[in-house]
Image (cartoon, rainbow, N blue to C red):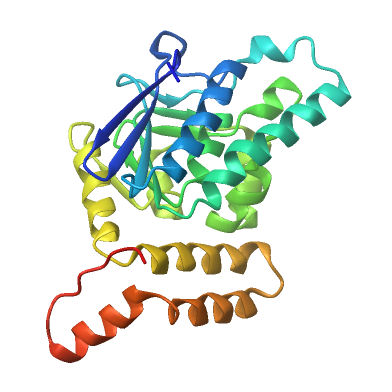
């Protein structure tokens, strides 16, 4: 597929998905969301892709929100369909992606942009980043998981404050709250995201996928411990687990094949 709103770049096993609407501060219009859905599916099924880094084009914004102009014609049913479709096809897909997904937040991450980052497994921010969920200033609320994922990361009270006041926070504040894992210079953002990703990619891919499933179950499933047990047991059917155990006992480095 030829993308009009995304840039796709493969650097070894790492695939970059760049939201490429710099003149619009990378706002998520319907065409960009559709392309993102396709790109995620391609990355998931591409055996040469070990992990994904999502970022925005230019130095000003990761994603500055949804394209509000597209909201003008929505009614209740249209809004319900929009939120349901994009939650299912994009934000939930990212959260449950079996390969690691890192958000490299380069500037503003507002509204749907912050929700996109929240869906990723790990977040790294540049020191100029600002984050917030300003939907109530439009008479709306977050519709792509913001009310669900933000409290799980930073606690209910602070999430309430961010959402109800609609105020932005700095990268430093986001780090203190546990919203982002690291804050680095703009110039160092890509390198830090790749450093984390490369550490993950040294490990057994099927075990990484199982760990993602089990960790997500702690938030989304009343039977999280049961999910962990299932995923733990499944590892013992893999060649990677046999290799990892054998390598440990032989005091050598493991060679994982993803099988």
In the image, 130: left or right of 86? left
Q: Is residue 44 visible?
A: yes
Q: Is residue 111 visible?
A: no
Image vertical order of residue 166 relative to residue 245, above or below? above
- Rendered residue at 30%/21% (across/down): 59
- Rendered residue at 63%/44% (across/down): 161
Image vertical order of residue 240 relative to residue 103, above or below? below
In the image, 94: left or right of 87? left
> Horizontal and vertical percent for residue 64?
49, 23
- Rendered residue at 27%/34% (across/down): 10
Image vertical order of residue 235 relative to residue 76, above or below? below
Splitting the image into 4 quarters, where does residue 115 fall?
top right
The quarter of the picture where the C terminus appears is bottom left
State how many labels appear.
Answer: 0
Q: Nearer the viewer, residue 144 or 211?
A: 211
> Horizontal and vertical percent for residue 192?
22, 46
Q: Residue lying furthest bottom in this view?
A: 249
- Rendered residue at 42%/32% (across/down): 130
Q: Residue lying furthest left in this view?
A: 252
> Horizontal and vertical percent for residue 149?
60, 50
In the image, 69: left or right of 50? right
Image vertical order of residue 110 relative to residue 155, above or below? above
Splitting the image into 4 quarters, where does residue 72 fall?
top right
The quarter of the picture where the N terminus appears is top left
Q: Nearer the viewer, residue 15 or 169?
A: 15
> Horizontal and vertical percent for residue 16?
33, 34
């Amino acid at each position: 597929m030829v993308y009009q709103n995304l840039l796709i770049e493969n650097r070894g096993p790492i695939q970059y998905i760049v939201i490429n609407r710099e003149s619009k501060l990378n706002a998520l219009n319907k065409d960009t969301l559709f392309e993102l859905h396709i790109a995620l599916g391609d990355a998931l099924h591409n055996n040469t892709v070990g992990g994904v880094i999502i970022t925005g084009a230019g130095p000003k914004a990761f994603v500055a929100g949804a394209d509000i102009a597209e909201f003008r014609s929505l009614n209740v049913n249209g809004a319900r369909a929009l939120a349901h479709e994009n939650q299912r096809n994009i934000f939930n897909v990212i959260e449950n992606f079996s390969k690691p997904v890192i958000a490299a937040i380069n500037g503003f991450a507002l509204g749907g942009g912050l929700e996109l980052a929240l869906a990723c497994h790990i977040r790294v921010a540049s020191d100029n980043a600002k984050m917030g969920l300003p939907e109530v200033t439009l008479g709306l609320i977050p519709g792509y998981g913001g009310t669900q994922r933000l409290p799980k990361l930073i606690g209910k009270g602070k999430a309430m404050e961010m959402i109800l006041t609609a105020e932005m926070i700095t990268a430093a504040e986001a780090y203190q709250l546990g919203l982002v894992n690291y804050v680095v210079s703009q110039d160092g953002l890509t390198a830090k995201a790749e450093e984390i990703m490369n550490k993950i990619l040294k490990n057994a891919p099927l075990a990484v996928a199982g760990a993602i499933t089990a960790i997500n179950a702690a938030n989304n499933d009343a039977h999280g411990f049961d999910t962990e047990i299932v995923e733990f047991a499944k590892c013992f059917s893999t060649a990677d687990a046999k290799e990892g155990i054998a390598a440990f006992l032989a005091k050598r480095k493991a060679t994982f094949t993803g099988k």
